Each structure stands twice: as C-alpha cells, then as structure tokens.
Image (cartoon, grey):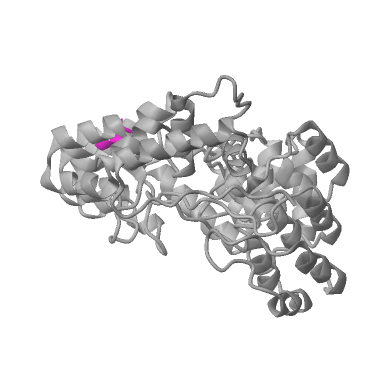
C-alpha cells in the first residue's frame, strides 16, 4: 500500500517568516534525501532533482502542502487576503478592495464565507442589490448558479435576484454567463429553456420516460443545450439511468462525450451513481452504458471500474495513467474508484484496485472551502449504505478507518478480511 503524503495544517495565526523557515528546512531535508521530505516533494513537484531543487521550488511545494496553488497565494492568505475579508469588503461595497483581493487570490471568489453556511461573495452582492459589485465578481468568475444545501437550485445568487425582482442584477449575471459560454446563450432562470429543463427533470425523476421524450421532441434543439457548467440532457438521462431517453438523445445527435464541471462525461456520471433513484442498479447502468459505448462514449477509469473491465484497469495502471476520480467533484465529494467498485458490486475489481495500491480510505479535498478539509471513509460508507452488513460488521470490529484527518489508513488486512467474509 502506498504511503499517503499528509497535508500540512496552518496554525491559527500564521507568520510568513516562519513559513519561509519551513521552506528552507524542506529544501535542506530534500537535498539530504530525508524520506519524509522526499515523499512530500515527490507528491507535489513532478520530476524534482535534488541537484537543481531551489528555495523557490521548496516554497511551491510548501504552498501546495498547505492547500494553495502557489507561494504568492499562500503569502496573500497570510497577509489577510481571505474569503472572510473579501465578503466583508463586498458587504461594505468597497470595489477597490475587492478588486485587489481578487487580483491576488482569484480563487476565493467562489469559496464559502466562514460562519455563514455556504454563502459566497456573489450571494452577498446580489442580496445587497449592488450592480457594480455583481459585475466585478462575475467578471472574475463568480458562479451565479451555485446554491446552498439542501435547496441548491432555489438558493443561487441568480435565483435570489430573479425572485426578488432585481432585474438589473439578473441581467448582469446572464450577460456575463453568455460571454463565458460563447455563441450559445446560457439558459436563464425562469426562461423557457430553464422551465423545459425543470419539466424534463421532473419527468425523468418520476421515471416517466415517455413524457421526457415528448418534451424533447417538442424542441429537438434542446438536445444540444448545455448549462454554464456543461451539463446536458444526456448527462441527466444517463445519470438517472433512463435508458429509453438516452437512446432517443443519441439517435437525435447528442454528443456522448461532453464534459461537465471539467471532468464528467454522461457515462462517468451514470457510473458514479450520484443521480440514481432507489431502484437504480448496476444492471440498469450496464444497459445504459451499452447504449453510450456503442455510440462512441470513451471509457475512463470510472466507467472501466463500473463495467468490471479489469484488463483496461491493469493496462492503464501499467502505463501510469490510472486516474482515481476521488479528485472529481459533483454535488459534493465523490468517493472514487474503490467506492465505484462497491456501488457496482464488484469485489474482484475492489481487490484489484487494492492490489494496485489505491488508498482504502480514499478521500477528496472538500471543494469551496478556504481551509483544507477532506472527506474520508467513502468506500465503507458506500458498503454500509448498500446493506453489505457482514462487511460492515467485520470492519466495525477492527480499528476505525480514521481517527483524525492525518490518521494512517486502515490496515490492509481489514479490507482483505472484509472481502473474504462479505456476502454480495
């Protein structure tokens, strides 16, 4: 089992001089070939050469260990450029301060405001009806359709603006979204595309595939529609395992390989199980996957695991190209390849993935948070949720999978014993 390189935890009141010293210590330790330093650098700096590794390289590795993309962004955080202060500046209407903070740390535009649920800067600006601030945030990549759990669709900044009659705010948001999407206008909340999409979702969630197809036939151009995040009707139909709708969409020219949120194809989304209803099953997925693959859908690590294609997985691993989808994010953390194997009742695939060194406590960094936080225990959670009781009881007799976010992963024998004793 590969050793997981731990992340560093920022102290409550960070000091840039201390961080500089840490970078220098990391540099010295890496050059001296100290194992922990070598592991940390290797995990976050591809092809590092001790003979050429310099202080600025060590600073980059340190920043990544703390959850930042670069040393300047880490420094900006220490200097007080935080999402909390950004939202405070938005609340004051201080355009100059917001502009400067986004110049230094553009990623905080869509992070959650600490202590305010999942509110973001754009929520604050939209609720203040601050048109200039909304325009500035949208220009810097704010997501106007990201809502607040558990009613995300009803709590986006755009929805707030529309329902409160802030027409000028909604217009700014839609105009900026259209610029981002290019020639195709983004669907607007309350517009015909949005209403049709809502009707389509209702029909598919109800399992009324005839109604869903009738709605699509009423406007065949809707087949090619994408929302600002790249989701298409085929993503929705595949994700809900609506085979007849998937067939209809494919026959009417739907692209079978579009990527939503940067990663998710319709086939991968179907494999993830994130939109399955209580009747969803691996067998239903296999039928949907057959339609998509026949139409040219690309196989990825997620779909290969779901389909039980062990030869594909072995080949990609040998090439160094087996990507664990635990880094993907869709409607919250996605467990990854081990969780996918559990979801699709594939114990042989699960055993193979463990043999290949995948982390039995696979985790993903939680999105939209300024501080570093991770999900954990997703494979076991999926097992318990699927009712695999003997595996759950077996694991519960062993040590907990994690006791804190830097705990060691569960012992491999726990998983081996679970595999040997569970009933599928």
Please tell me in which quadrant of the rendered image residue 348 appears.
bottom right
Residue at x-position 49% and y-position 42%: 65
Position in image of residue 187 (x %, y %): 41, 40
Residue 140 belongs to the span the image colors magenta: yes
| For residue 176, above or below residue 110 | above
Confirm whether residue 142 shows in the render: no
The residue under the point 48% across, 27% down is 57
Q: Which residues are magenta?
A: 137-141
Question: Extreme front residue here?
Answer: 32
**Total label count?**
0
Instruction: Pinpoint residue 5: horizontal percent, then vertical percent.
Output: 59, 47
Residue 165 relative to residue 117: left or right: left
Q: Give the percent coordinates (x, y) of residue 363.
A: 59, 55
The furthest residue to the top: 52
Is residue 285 located in the magenta-colored stretch of the structure? no
For the C terminus, give its image quadrant. Answer: bottom right
Per the picture, the main secondary structure of the magenta-coloured stretch is helix
Residue placed most toward the observer, 405 or 301: 405
Counting from the top left corner in percent of width and height, residue 109 is at: 32, 41
| Picture layout, residue 157 above or below residue 182 | below
Q: Quadrant of residue 414?
A: bottom right
Image side of residue 124 versus residue 45, left or right = left
Q: Which residue sits at x=47%, y=49%?
A: 8
Of the pair 101 and 270, the residue shown nearer to us: 101
Q: Nearer the viewer, residue 333 or 352?
A: 352
For the question of whether residue 217 can be seen, the reply is yes
């Amino acid at each position: 089992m590969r050793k997981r390189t731990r992340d560093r935890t920022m102290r409550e009141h960070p000091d840039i001089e201390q961080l500089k010293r840490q970078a220098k210590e990391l540099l010295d330790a890496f050059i001296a070939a100290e194992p922990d330093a070598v592991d940390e650098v290797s995990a976050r700096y591809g092809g590092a050469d001790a003979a050429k590794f310099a202080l600025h390289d060590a600073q980059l590795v340190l920043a990544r260990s703390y959850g930042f993309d670069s040393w300047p962004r880490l420094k900006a955080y220490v200097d007080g450029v935080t999402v909390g202060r950004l939202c405070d500046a938005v609340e004051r209407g201080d355009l100059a301060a917001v502009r400067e903070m986004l110049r230094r740390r553009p990623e905080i535009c869509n992070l959650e405001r600490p202590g305010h649920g999942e509110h973001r800067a754009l929520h604050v600006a939209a609720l203040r009806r601050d048109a200039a601030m909304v325009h500035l945030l949208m220009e810097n990549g704010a997501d106007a359709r990201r809502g607040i759990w558990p009613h995300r669709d009803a709590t986006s900044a755009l929805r707030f603006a529309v329902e409160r009659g802030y027409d000028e705010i909604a217009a700014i948001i839609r105009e900026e979204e259209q610029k981002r999407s290019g020639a195709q206008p983004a669907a607007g909340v309350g517009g015909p595309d949005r209403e049709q999409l809502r009707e389509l979702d209702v029909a598919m969630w109800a399992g009324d595939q005839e109604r869903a197809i009738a709605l699509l036939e009423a406007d065949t151009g809707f087949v090619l529609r994408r929302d600002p995040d790249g989701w298409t009707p085929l993503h929705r139909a595949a994700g809900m395992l609506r085979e007849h709708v998937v067939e209809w969409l494919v026959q009417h020219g739907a692209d079978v390989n579009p990527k939503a949120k940067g990663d998710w194809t319709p086939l991968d989304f179907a494999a993830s199980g994130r939109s399955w209803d209580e009747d969803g099953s691996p067998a239903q997925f296999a039928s949907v996957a057959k339609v998509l693959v026949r139409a040219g859908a690309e196989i990825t690590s997620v779909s290969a695991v779901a389909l039980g294609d062990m030869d594909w997985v072995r080949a990609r691993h040998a090439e160094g190209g087996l990507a664990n989808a635990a880094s993907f994010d869709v409607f919250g953390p996605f467990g990854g390849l081990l969780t996918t194997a559990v979801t699709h009742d594939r114990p042989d695939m699960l055993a193979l993935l463990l043999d290949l060194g995948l982390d039995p406590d696979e985790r993903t960094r939680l999105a939209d948070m300024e501080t570093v936080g991770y999900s954990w225990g997703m494979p076991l959670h999926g097992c318990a949720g699927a009712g695999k009781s003997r595996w759950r009881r077996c694991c519960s007799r062993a040590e907990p999978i994690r006791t804190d976010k830097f705990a060691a992963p569960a012992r491999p024998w726990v998983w081996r014993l679970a595999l040997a004793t569970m009933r599928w």
